[in-house]
Image (cartoon, rainbow, N blue to C red):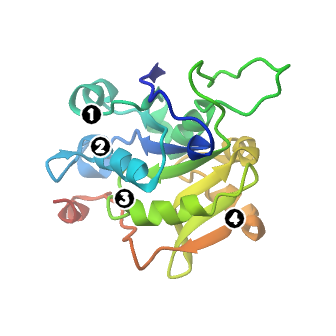
Amino acid sequence: MTHTEDAGATGAECQVAGLILAAGGGRRLGGRPKALLEHRGRPLVEHAVRTLRTAGCTRVHVVLGAAADTVRERARLEGCVLVDNPDWAQGMGTSLRAGLASLPRPVSPADPPGPGAHAREGPARAALVLLVDQPGIGPQAVARVLAAYEGESSLVSAAYDGERGHPVLFGSRHWAGVAATATGDRGARAYLSAHREALTLVECGDVARPFDIDTPEDLAHLE
């Protein structure tokens, strides 16, 4: 894991860490890594970072996998914590687990820092997860989900016409459960389904389009 720290952010404004899952290899795109797809002249991962920061996330972790070294060379990711996922080919669930493991957890003074802790970061009390291949989800939708944060027990998802989508915010009390059930390309789907009664849905269909860039036909969404 490589840290390029955004120093100076403290207090309530950085309790929620933005977490971008950007490790995909673009198998259905002919092996074009999704993080490097161009959108408005820059790699797609840059747009995801800008979206989170514009929405109010002062700390951003980015999970890299396919062509990680090239992503580091081409994309401007200053101030982000870059997380390598060597198991990215096994599916998005591995990236979600790697991203959550990279976040400094709330601990008591008697506890040693966990493996994701960083000396210059305070504990993250929630993670707001955004997928790199959804450029139609912009700062307005992210800000709505972020505004629903109410502490370490928060479980919040954007909704589109009432259907659950991204981004999703997981309070730190949910991280272990999410990591335990995140397998393949399903990510947190099983956990969210099992905890639907605790989930707050925030309608974002009026401000965002939740399409994915998965196939060559989807590339028409990029500018």
Distance from disc 4 to disc 2, alpha carbons, whole Å, reads 31 Å
| Disc nearest the viewer among 4 and 2 | 2
Residue 134's label in the rendered image is 3
Indicate the amino acid at tag 1.
Arg
Cβ atoms at labels 2 and 3 below 8 Å apart: no
Distance from disc 1 to disc 2, alpha carbons, whole Å, reads 6 Å
First reached walking from the N terminus: tag 1 or tag 4: 1
Instruction: Decide which of 86, 78 is in the foreground and name it.
Output: 78
Q: Residues within 10 Å of mark 1 (few under 14, many from 20)?
A: some
Residue, disc 4: 193
Distance from disc 1 to disc 4, alpha carbons, whole Å, reads 36 Å
Please give the name of the residue rendered at 51% of the width and 39% of the height, measured from the top-left corner: 95
Residue, disc 1: 76
Q: How crowded is mark 2: few (under 14 residues within 10 Å), some or many (20 or more)?
A: many
User: Is residue 110 shown above or below 106?
Assistant: above
Indicate the amino acid at tag 3.
Gln
| Disc nearest the viewer among 1 and 4 | 1
Cβ atoms at labels 1 and 2 below 8 Å apart: yes
Cβ atoms at labels 1 and 4 below 8 Å apart: no
Residue, disc 2: 46
- Quadrant containing the C terminus is bottom left
First reached walking from the N terminus: tag 1 or tag 2: 2
The picture places residue 83, in percent across and down from the top left corner, at: 47, 28
Cβ atoms at labels 4 and 2 below 8 Å apart: no
Indicate the amino acid at tag 2.
Glu
Please give the name of the residue rendered at 29% of the width and 27% of the height, measured from the top-left corner: 72
Instruction: Decide which of 156, 183 is in the foreground and name it.
Output: 156
Cβ atoms at labels 1 and 3 below 8 Å apart: no
The picture places residue 52, in percent across and down from the top left corner, at: 42, 50
Distance from disc 4 to disc 3, alpha carbons, whole Å, reads 22 Å
